[in-house]
Amino acid sequence: MLSGKTDNLKKGTLPRLDPAAYIGYKHVSFTAVTLDRRHVFVRRAVVDPCIAMLSEDCARHNCECLVYVFMPDHVHLILHGCDASSDVLQSHNTWKGRTGNELCGQFMCHTIWQPRSRDHVLRSHEYERGALRNMLQYALQNPARAGLVSTWQDYPFVGSLIGPYDIRHPYWWDWFYNGRE
C-alpha cells in the first residue's frame, strides 16, 4: 500500500488519498481526461456552461477555483478549500458528474470522462518550495506546451474564478500571491 493512499485499488486505477485528505484548507490540482481522449472542449458553447457549473459547485462545497484550463481532451483545475469543512474532492466530483451528464446529452454518448482524475494535494512542507506557484504555472502553460498557442495568455479557455482581475492581467498575480504563500 502506498503511504496515505487507500488500499482498495483495482488494477489500472489511480491511487487516491483517504477522503479526509481533501477536507479543509487544501490546495488540490486535478486533471480530468475525456474518455478515449475525445476532443470535447474546443468551442466556447461547450466550455462556458462547464465554467458556470464549476462556479456553482465550488460555492456549494465552499471552495475556490484558482485556475482552470480546458484543453481539447482534458481539464486542469486547481481548487482550494476556503474553510475547515470545505470538501475539495466532493466539489470536483460533483462538477465532473454534472458536466458529464450535460455533455453526454450534447455528444450523444454514455460517458464523457475517464473514471478517475489525477490529483495532487499540496502538503504543508511543499509551500516552502513555491509548489503552489509551480502548480498554477504548470497548468496555465499547458496550451503553449501542447503547441495550441504561443503563450498561455492567447488561449481562450483559461481563467480563474477568484479575484478582481482577469487572470491574464499582470495585477492578478500580484493580487493572488499577496499572502497566499
Image (cartoon, rainbow, N blue to C red):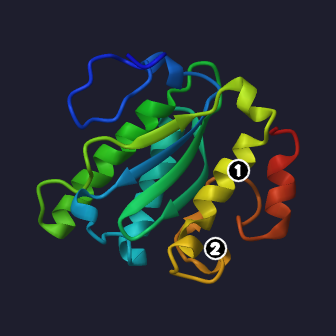
Compare residues 48 and 43 and report the one nearer the observer. Answer: 43
Residue 9 found in image quarter: top left
Residue 109 found in image quarter: bottom left
User: Which residue is pictured at 37% across the width and 29% down the height?
Assistant: 15
In this rendering, position of residue 91 left or right of residue 180: left
Residue type for callout 1? Asn
User: Which residue is pictured at 74% across the width and 25% down the height?
Assistant: 125
In the rendered image, the quadrant that contains the N terminus is top left
Distance from Cα at disc 2 to Cα at disc 1: 15 Å
The numbered dot on residue 150 is none
User: Which residue is pictured at 68% across the width and 58% down the height?
Assistant: 137
Kindly identify which residue carries mark 1.
134
First of labels 2, 1 by sequence position = 1
In the image, residue 31 sits, relative to residue 20, either above or below, namely: below
The numbered dot on residue 152 is 2
Q: Position of residue 73 (x, y in %)?
A: 35, 66
Q: Position of residue 21 (x, y in %)?
A: 52, 20
In this rendering, position of residue 61 left or right of residue 27: left
Compare residues 136 and 79 and report the one nearer the observer. Answer: 136
In this rendering, position of residue 98 left or right of residue 170: left
Q: Is mark 1 on a helix, strand or loop?
A: helix
Compare residues 30 and 56 and report the one nearer the observer. Answer: 30
In the image, residue 52 sits, relative to residue 170, either above or below, namely: above
